[in-house]
Image (tube, rainbow, N blue to C red):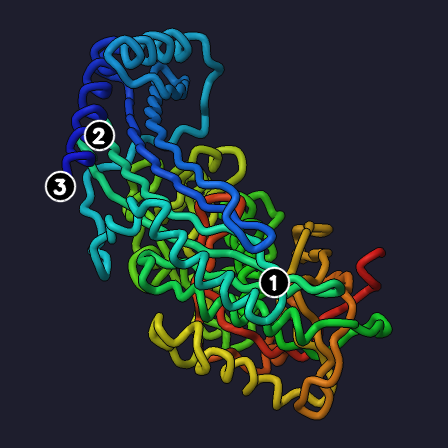
């Protein structure tokens, strides 16, 4: 156990015992102590303009007593701050409304064993290490006569959890991510990637890819809206995976009837196998959730058949099943969702291959199979129109090209789409899956996705970017 983890585990146990004493021995109590180190380097106009770093300690105390539940959080972690946290949470639980959905605390259970220990050097890397990769990215872009912008971040999260049922676990999550664009007067090219190890990220290769995309998408043409055969690059597919996770593989949404998911049904093409996996691959993920429940790999879809959704203890109780280890601070209201989703490729490349010629040839191999369609780099500003069918609207971004007879012929102006994501992946609609699944980190939360490229029979484009 690292010293930081030991300190946070001791703090969790100390707050737990104080809360049990104050609330009475029959109360259910759990405590989460989290430390997050987040460091960020931003660059624009091809130079670094900002380095920032923050270290935040948070203690969350939850008490359930006499059928009522109260939760409080503090970032003041000295003795006085922790005592005040206990005092106000005990006072709040006495005034809280009845909580009929309370499902009890997680019992003692061991954590799964990850494929590798967290790379603490990545989590604690300083601005010099980030600047080295940013320079490599920018040098490739400026060598092509373009300007670069983006960010490079690294984060380390140490979490300790303890409850009155005897469950006490701790863990560390590490992540590094780079996200950038290259710009011309009429086009952008983007590239991004995330990993548990900084050594997996190749700034030069990513910069070269962004520059090549920007140059290739200059002076785009307009095309008529309609349904087109598409090759979606991994960056666009990551959006599909996060949307499926949030709206579809959400146990609360399934119970309430707002999810498309139908357990046991062949809802997807047989090529589709979707797993929520915190243990393997370059995507970072915690080994337990906010309720201390261990997280094992969860097969959401196997060979096209929907098999599972994510649950916390509340939604699992409602569905007469068990928690899958996906509780979060907001899952009681928003539902539990998968957070480390991987679409299985037919062949998995090593991390060093996903930025090089092998990765580009994987997309190129899909392009050669298209008679007439579109190559799409990115989705942007996607919004849900119909959660039951999971119809989304959004825009393409950072490069779209017309494919004719297996070759890219013209860059295309950005398009608006309106498309049911599950229906796009339905039986017979997935024509091929790329041979690698690079990892991406969400800008909007602690989510990751491992996404290969997709060749789909159709995607519904409803207009230009302006409407």
Say which element carries label 1. Answer: strand
Label 1 Cα crowd, 10 Å radius (few <14 / some 14-19 / many 20+):
many
Looking at marks 1 and 3 on the same chain, the residue that comes earlier in the sequence is marked by 3
Q: CA distance from mark 3 to mark 2?
A: 11 Å
Identify the mark at residue 8; answer none if there is no mark. 2
Residue 293: image location, x then y, percent: 29, 42
Label 2, secondary structure: give it: helix
In the picture, which quadrant includes the C terminus? bottom right
Name the residue at 55% across, 70% down.
143
Q: Against 364, is 220 above or below? A: above
Name the image quarter holding residue 458.
bottom right
Residue at the spot 38% in from the left edge and 7% down from the top edge:
91
User: Of label 3 and label 2, which has the lower sequence position?
Assistant: 3
Distance from disc 1 to disc 3, alpha carbons, whole Å, reads 43 Å
The residue labelled by disc 1 is 182
Q: Earlier in the sequence, mark 1 or mark 2?
A: 2
Q: Which residue is mark 3?
A: 1
Q: How many marks?
A: 3
Whether residue 449 can be seen here: no
Instruction: For mark 3, give the secondary structure.
Output: loop
Circle 1/circle 3 CB separation < 8 Å: no
**Nearest the camera: 204 or 68?**
204
Residue at horizontal 13 percent and vertical 41 percent from the top:
1
Where 2 sits versus 376, above or below? above
Horizontally, residue 118 falls left or right of residue 71, namely left
* Viewer-closest of 222 and 277: 222
Q: What mark, if any, has residue 111 been given in the picture? A: none
The reply to whether residue 455 is in sight is: yes
């Amino acid at each position: 156990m690292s010293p930081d983890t030991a300190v946070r585990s001791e703090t969790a146990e100390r707050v737990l015992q104080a809360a049990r004493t104050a609330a009475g021995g029959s109360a259910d109590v759990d405590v989460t102590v989290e430390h997050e180190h987040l460091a960020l380097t931003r660059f624009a106009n091809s130079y670094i303009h900002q380095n920032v770093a923050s270290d935040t300690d948070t203690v969350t105390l939850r008490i359930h007593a006499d059928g009522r539940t109260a939760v409080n959080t503090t970032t003041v972690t000295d003795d006085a701050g922790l005592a005040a946290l206990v005092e106000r949470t005990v006072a709040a639980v006495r005034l809280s409304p009845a909580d009929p959905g309370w499902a009890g605390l997680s019992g003692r259970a061991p954590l799964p064993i990850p494929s590798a220990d967290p790379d603490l050097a990545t989590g604690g890397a300083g601005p010099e290490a980030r600047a080295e990769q940013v320079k490599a990215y920018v040098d490739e872009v400026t060598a092509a006569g373009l300007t670069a912008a983006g960010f490079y971040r690294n984060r380390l999260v140490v979490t300790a959890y303890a409850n009155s049922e005897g469950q006490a676990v701790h863990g560390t999550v590490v992540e590094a991510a780079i996200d950038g664009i290259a710009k011309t007067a009429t086009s952008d090219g983007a590239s991004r990637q995330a990993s548990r190890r900084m050594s997996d990220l190749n700034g030069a290769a990513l910069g070269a890819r962004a520059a090549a995309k920007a140059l290739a998408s200059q002076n785009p043409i307009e095309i008529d809206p309609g349904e087109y055969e598409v090759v979606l690059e991994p960056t666009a597919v990551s959006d599909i995976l996060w949307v499926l996770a949030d709206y579809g593989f959400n146990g609360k949404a399934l119970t309430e009837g707002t999810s498309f998911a139908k357990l046991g049904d062949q809802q997807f093409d047989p090529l589709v196998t979707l797993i929520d996996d915190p243990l393997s691959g370059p995507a970072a993920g915690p080994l337990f959730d906010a309720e201390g429940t261990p997280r094992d790999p969860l097969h959401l879809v196997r060979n096209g058949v929907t098999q599972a959704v994510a649950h916390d203890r509340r939604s699992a109780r409602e569905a007469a099943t068990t928690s899958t280890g996906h509780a979060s601070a907001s899952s009681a209201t928003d539902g539990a969702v998968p957070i480390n989703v991987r679409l299985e490729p037919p062949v998995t490349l090593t991390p060093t291959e996903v930025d090089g010629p092998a990765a580009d040839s994987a997309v190129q191999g899909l392009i050669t199979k298209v008679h007439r369609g579109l190559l799409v780099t990115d989705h942007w500003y996607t919004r849900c129109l119909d959660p039951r069918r999971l119809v989304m609207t959004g825009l393409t971004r950072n490069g779209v090209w017309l494919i004719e007879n297996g070759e890219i012929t013209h860059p295309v102006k950005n398009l608006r789409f309106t498309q049911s994501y599950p229906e796009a992946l339905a039986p017979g609609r997935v024509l091929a899956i790329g041979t690698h699944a690079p990892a991406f980190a969400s800008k909007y939360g602690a989510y990751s996705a491992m996404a290969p490229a997709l060749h789909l029979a159709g995607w519904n484009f409803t207009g230009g970017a302006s409407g």
